[in-house]
Amino acid sequence: QEQLVESGGGLVQAGGSLRLSCAASGRTFSRYIMGWFRQAPGKEREFVAHISESGRRTSYTDSVKGRFTISRDNAKNTVYLQMNSLKPEDTALYYCAADRSKTGSYEYWGQGTQVTVSS
C-alpha cells in the first residue's frame, strides 16, 4: 500500500506561483507513473499532468500547458507540480496519484491540498 501526502497549497493572487509536493511512503515509488489531478467545487475531478517513472516523459491538460511543470525526484520519493501564472480558474483541491499498473487506473491517491487563486 502506497501512502501519498500532498503539501504546498495555499492562497495566492492571480499571476502568482505555487509549488505542490507529494511525498510517497513506499519503496517502489520509482516504478509508478505519477499524476496530478484537481477538483473544483461543483465540478468533476480532472487530469492535470502526469510523469513517467523515469521523469523523461510528461503530459499536461491543455489548460495548464506552458504554465505548470511536473517533475519528480525518485531519490526523495517525491513528485512536484510547479504552477506559474496562476488564474482564478485554477482554484481547486489538488491530488497526486500513483499509477502502479500503468493502465491509467491510479490505484493510490493522496488526501489533496487546496489551491485558491484570488482575482
Image (tube, grey):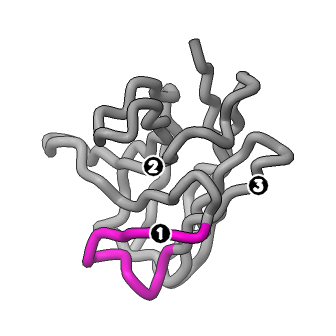
Image quadrant in which you'd find residue 78: top right
Q: Rounded to the nearest whole Å, what is the CA distance between mark 3 and mark 1?
A: 14 Å
Question: Between residues 104 and 23, which one lies in front from this camera angle?
Answer: 104
Give the residue displayed 51% in from the left and 59% down from the top. Answer: 51
Would you call the spot at circle 2 few (<14 residues within 10 Å), some (14-19), or many (20 or more)?
Answer: many
Residue 72 - label: none
Give the residue displayed 57% in from the left and 12% down from the top. Answer: 1
Question: Between residues 109 and 6, which one lies in front from this camera angle?
Answer: 109
The relative height of residue 62 versus residue 118 in the rendered view (above or below) is below
Residue type, label 1:
Thr
Closer to the N terminus: mark 3 or mark 2?
A: 2
Q: Rounded to the nearest whole Å, what is the CA distance between mark 3 and mark 2?
A: 14 Å
Closer to the N terminus: mark 3 or mark 1?
A: 1
Image quadrant in which you'd find residue 55: bottom right
Which residue position is annotated with label 3? 73
Which residue position is annotated with label 1? 58
Which residue position is annotated with label 2? 35
Drawn side of residue 14 relative to residue 20, left or right: left
- Give the x, y percent position of residue 108: 46, 25
Drawn side of residue 6 relative to residue 35, left or right: right
Placement of the C terminus among the 4 image quadrants? bottom left
Q: CB of mark 3 within 8 Å of CB of mark 1? A: no
The relative height of residue 50 versus residue 112 in the rendered view (above or below) is below
Residue type, label 2:
Gly
Q: Rounded to the nearest whole Å, what is the CA distance between mark 2 and mark 1?
A: 9 Å
Dot 1 falls on a residue whose secondary structure is strand
The stretch in magenta equals 56-68
